[in-house]
């Protein structure tokens, strides 16, 4: 990931989801849906072996 993008995303805690969504739609040349999408953390993986 280019340094400038990484710095903009990581320097704004709590806003990464919104910023990434906006950036991806812009890069794809698509209009962003009007409604917000709920974001939840990904669950931690289960260990396969002790």
Image (tube, grey):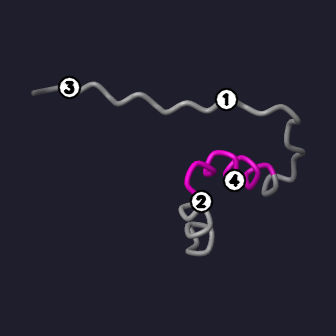
Disc 1: which residue: 38
Crowd tier of the residue under label 3, counting other residues whose Cα lies within 10 Å: few below 14, some 14–19, many 20 or above: few
Q: Could you tell me which secondary element the residue under label 2 belongs to?
A: loop
The x, y position of residue 8, in whole percent, is 62, 67
Looking at marks 1 and 4 on the same chain, the residue that comes earlier in the sequence is marked by: 4
Q: In whole angstroms, how far apart are the C-alphas of marks 3 and 4? A: 34 Å
Picture residue at 59% right of the left edge, 59% below the top: 12
Which residue is disc 4 drawn over? 19
> Which quadrant, please, contains the N terminus?
bottom right
Please report the residue visible at 90 percent of the width from the left and 45 percent of the height from the top.
Answer: 31
Tag nearer the camera, 2 or 3? 2
Residue 33, by quadrant, is top right
Number of disc labels? 4
Q: CA distance from mark 2 to mark 3?
A: 35 Å
Which portion, as a residue range, is magenta? 13-25
* Residue at (76, 51) in percent of width and height: 22
Precedes in sequence: disc 1 or disc 3 = 1
Instruction: Give SS at disc 3.
Output: loop
Q: CA distance from mark 1 to mark 3?
A: 30 Å
Q: Position of residue 46 (x, y in %)?
A: 28, 25
Question: In the image, which is nearer the foreground, mark 3 or mark 4?
Answer: 4
Identify the mark nearer the N-term, 3 or 4: 4
Of circles 1 and 3, the one toward us is 1
Whether tag 1 and tag 4 are in contact, CB under 8 A, the answer is no
Q: Which residue is mark 2?
A: 12
- Cβ–Cβ under 8 Å for marks 2 and 1: no
Secondary structure beneath disc 4?
A: helix
Instruction: Give the residue pinned by disc 3.
Output: 48
Answer with mark 2 or mark 1, whichever residue precedes in sequence. 2
How would you rate the neighbour count of disc 1 (Cα within 10 Å): few for under 14, some for 14-19, many for 20 or more?
few
Q: Is 40 drawn above or below residue 25 in the view shown?
A: above
Q: Looking at the image, do the residues carrying marks 4 and 2 touch, with CB atoms under 8 Å apart?
A: yes
């Amino acid at each position: 990931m280019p340094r400038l993008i990484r710095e903009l995303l990581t320097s704004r805690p709590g806003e990464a989801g919104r910023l990434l969504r906006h950036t991806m739609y812009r890069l794809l040349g698509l209009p962003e849906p009007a409604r917000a999408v709920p974001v939840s953390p990904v669950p931690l993986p289960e260990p396969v072996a002790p």
